[in-house]
Image (cartoon, helix red, strand yellow):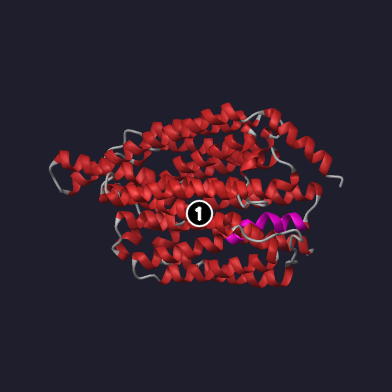
Amino acid sequence: MHRKWWTLLVVCVATFMLLLDITIVNVALPSIQKSLHASFQDLQWVVDAYALTLAALLLTAGSLADLLGRKRVFLLGIGVFTLASLLCGLSTTPLMLNLARGFQGVGGAIMFACSLALLAQEFQGRERGTAYGVWGAAISAAAAVGPLIGGGLTEGLGWEYIFFINVPVGALAIVLGALRLSDTRDPDATGVDWLGLVTFSASLFLLVLALIRGNTEGWSSTTIVAELAGAVVLFALFLVAELRQERPMFDLTLFRKPTFGGVSLAAFTLSASLFAMFLYITLYLQNILGYSPLQTGVRFIPVTGIGLVLAPLAGRAASRGSPRWFLGVGLALVAAGLFLMHGVAADSTWTVLLPGLILAGAGVGIANPVLAQVAVGVVPPARSGMASGINNTCRQVGIATGIAGLGAVFQHQVQTKAAQLHSHAPQAAKEAFASGLNEILIVGGIVAAVGAGLALLLVRQADMAEGAARADVVAPA
C-alpha cells in the first residue's frame, strides 16, 4: 500500500481516538461519580479539563509541528495521549482523573493540529478532497458510536476501560506512524507564540473556573469577581499580543470578513448548546430514569445516527448552494430540538426526549460539515490551516464554556427548586434535577437560536466567491 494511504489510515485512527474521548466519556460519568465519589463539579471537569487543554493548545501545536516536523510532533501527541489514557484508567480520585484528562487533551491537541497538515503533504488535487472526506467521516463516526462504545465498555468491563482501550490502539498508531509517515516542516516557521498561548489559556481557565464555582462561592464573592475580571484582562492582553505578532497563532485579521466571524460563532454556539447539553441529558437518563450506560448509549442513536446520515449529503449540497442557509437552518433545528425536549419530569419516559433528539440530530448533520467548508473556503489556501484551527478551537471553547455556563444555571435552579420543596427525599431530588434540566434546555435552545441568526446575518456568498478566486490564482504556482 502506498505511503499516502498509510498516512490516511494513521491520521484517521488517531483522530477517531481523540474525538471519541469527547463523546465516549459522557455515558460513563455516573459510574465515575459513584466509583470515585465525585461531586457535580468534578464531573464537569472530567469533560472540561480535556476540552480546555484541547482548545488552548490546538493552534500552538500546529506552530510547533511546522517548526519541529509534523511526523515527529504527531507521534509525540499520540504518545502523550496514550500515556494520559492509561493514567485516566488508573485514577483513584477525581483530582487525579481530571489532571490526567487535561494531559490527555494536550496529546489530543497535538494530534488534531497535525492531522490536516499530514494529509495535505501526501495528497494533491482531487485525491486531497477524497482524503479530507474520509477524515471527516472518521470525525462523524466518532460522534456517532462514542455513546454506544462508552456504554458497552462501562457496563461490561468498567468505566476505566473507556480509557484503557486507547492504550493498544495508540501503541499501534505509533508503530505504524513511525514506519510509514514522512516528516516535513515549514522552512519559514518562526517559532511558538508563547505570549498568546499563556494569555489565551489562562483567560479560558479562569472563565471556566468562575462559572463552575460561582454557585458555591457566590457570584458577588471576591474570588469569583476576581476570576472573571482576570479572564477579561487576560483575554484583552491576548488580543493585543495577537495584533502585534508578525505571525500570530490566532490571526485576528481573518475576522475582517463577516463570513469568517459568522462561521466561528456558529461553531461556538453549536458546541455550547447541544454538545454541552449531552452531559446533563446523560445524567438525567441514568441517575433519574435509571438506565444503564449501554441503554443510555442506545438512546443517543437518534441524535448521532441521523447526523451521520445527513452530514455527507449536506456537505455535497452546500458546495453547490448557499452555505449560510445550511448553517442557519441546521442551528435553528438544534434550537427547536432543545426547546422540544423541554418539559421533562422526574417520572417521564425517555421517549419524551425522542422528537427533540431527532430534530437536533438533523440540525447537527446539516450544519456540522458546512462549518469546516466555510471556514477554509473564505480564506486564501495558504491560510486554510489557520482557519481550520481557529474553527476547531471555537468548537472546543464552546464545549468548555457551555458545560460550565449551563452547569451554573442548572445548579442554581436545582438548589432553588429543592428549597421550594422543603425536602431531601429521593423523589424531591429527582424533581429538582428535572427542573434544572428544563431550565438549561431553554438556555441551550436560545444559544443555538442566536447562532442561527448570526450565521444567516454574517455568512455571505460573496466572501466564499472571493476565497475561491484567490484559490484559482494561487493553485497553479
In the depicted structure, whether residue 359 falls above or below residue 165: above
Look at the image and tell me whether residue 140 can be seen: no
Secondary structure of the residue carrying numbered label 1: helix
- Alpha-carbon neighbours of circle 1 within 10 Å: few (<14), some, or many (≥20)? many
Q: Residue 360 at what x, y percent from top left? A: 48, 36
Q: Nearer the viewer, residue 90 or 231?
A: 231
Using the rendered view, name the quadrant where residue 445 is placed.
top left
Side (left or right) of 336 relative to 414: right
Q: Residue 399 at what x, y percent from top left? A: 46, 47
Which residue type carries mark 1? Answer: Thr
Using the rendered view, name the quadrant where residue 25 is placed.
bottom left
In the depicted structure, whether residue 220 falls above or below residue 450: below
Look at the image and tell me whether residue 135 can be seen: yes
Of helix, strand and loop, which mostly describes the magenta segment? helix
Query: Residue at coordinates 50% horizontally, 64% vertically from top-left?
Result: 104
* Count of marks overlaid on the render: 1
Residue that carries the numbered disc 1 in the rendered image? 199
Q: Nearer the viewer, residue 84 or 152?
A: 84
Query: Residue at coordinates 39% horizontally, 47% vertically from top-left?
Result: 229
Is residue 116 covered in magenta? yes
Is residue 198 covered in magenta? no
Using the rendered view, name the quadrant where residue 97 is placed.
bottom left
Q: Nearer the viewer, residue 78 or 460?
A: 460
Side (left or right) of 287 relative to 200: left
Q: Residue 334 at what x, y percent from top left? A: 48, 35
Query: Residue at coordinates 52% horizontally, 55% vertically from top-left?
Result: 56
In the depicted structure, whether residue 394 falls above or below residue 7: above
State which region is magenta. 110-121
Side (left or right) of 133 relative to 77: right
Q: Residue 265 at what x, y percent from top left? A: 54, 38
